[in-house]
Amino acid sequence: MSVFIIRRLIQASLVVFLMSLIVFFGVNVVGDPVYMLISPDADQAEIQATIARLGLDRPIHEQYLLFLDGAWRGDLGNSFVFGEPALRLILHHMPATLELAFTALAMAIVIGIPLGLYAGLYPDQAVSKGIMAGSILGFSLPTFWVGLMFIMLFAVVLGWLPSTGRGDTATFLGIESSLFTLDGLSHILLPALNLALLKISLAIRLTRAGVREAMGQDYVKFARAKGISTKRIILVHVMKNIMIPVVTVMGLEFGALVAFSVVTESIFAWPGMGKLLIDAILQLDRPIVVAYLMIIVLFFVVINLLVDIVYSILDPRVRLQDQGA
């Protein structure tokens, strides 16, 4: 077990290092932030002073080495625009993004799994075919277009829900969230649903495929032969077996919800990391862009590392296959 974990840690460290190279050099060769920060009437002396203050007068490889040295100490640089540590700014906006992602994931599970279960149990019914057609739409429709349609319908035409902002927040057990107030819930409903549509479709298709496969297995036939009720077969036998892959995939998809919430946060003016990233890109605030991308990389690496470790604990064959490879 220790060899397996050490090997995975080395692989994860290598991935983070390579991504830091790609992210840093990719971001720092695009545009010139100096002219976004100074007055158009600034003379050459002011321009050179700004370049030196930002550390942009050094060769790119020296900037990268300084970045690595700071990252090792938890310092991902200071924002060009705000003059504050980029990591602090991102962590300040992270709770709003995590709140949105958790809500979207909960919607995907609560809506997607029951619909997928129904479609798997009754595949020939018109309702099931409608559910599967809807899942295809969920995969196909662009997130930004759906978000705009939600705003037009529920906020502008019907006036049921607010279209922008996070709403009022409250603190419960030391956690501040908009989920603890009615105003906050009304604000999060549209952006969370918009973000969850793709994951709902994924949950529907995964659950349906699992149910269709499980219903033909011998253990289901044996349970029916014993006279066990259909309800018990579904809830105890079928659901128990299909939930492992569904929950695993949905858990990994949580990282995607965090990473790809940028569009949703921009459309609904949600004050999370995604909106901060868009603002930083428009202002060429390189430290915030680099810090955000590195945090997302770490997020994905840690999730995949934890999944590998848990799988190796639950199934020793994973470790044996890894050693054989």
Image (cartoon, grey):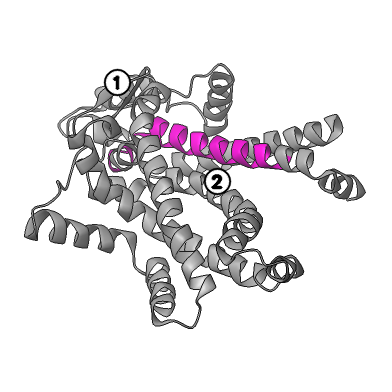
Residue 29 seen in the figure: no
SS at mark 1 in the image: strand
Q: In the drawing, does residue 7 fall left or right of residue 98?
A: right
Residue 314: x %, y % from top left: 76, 42
How crowded pointer 1 is (Cα within 10 Å; few <14, some 14-19, many 20+) is rated as few
Residue 10: x %, y % from top left: 75, 34
Dividing the picture into quadrants, the one containing residue 299 is top right
Type of secondary structure dominating the magenta stretch: helix
Mark 1 in CB contact with mark 2 (< 8 angstroms): no
- As for residue 293 lying within the magenta part, the answer is yes
Residue found at x 64% / y 35%:
17
Residue segment shown in magenta: 280-308
Q: Which residue is mark 2?
A: 251
Q: Which residue is mark 1?
A: 171
Distance CA(mark 1)–CA(mark 2): 26 Å
Q: In the drawing, does residue 43 fall left or right of residue 257?
A: left
Residue found at x 67% / y 38%:
305
Q: Is residue 35 above or below residue 109?
A: above
SS at mark 2 in the image: helix
Q: Using the image as rendered, state which of residue 234 and residue 56 is in the foreground.
A: 234
Q: Is residue 114 above or below residue 74?
A: below
Amino acid carrying mark 2 in the image: Gly
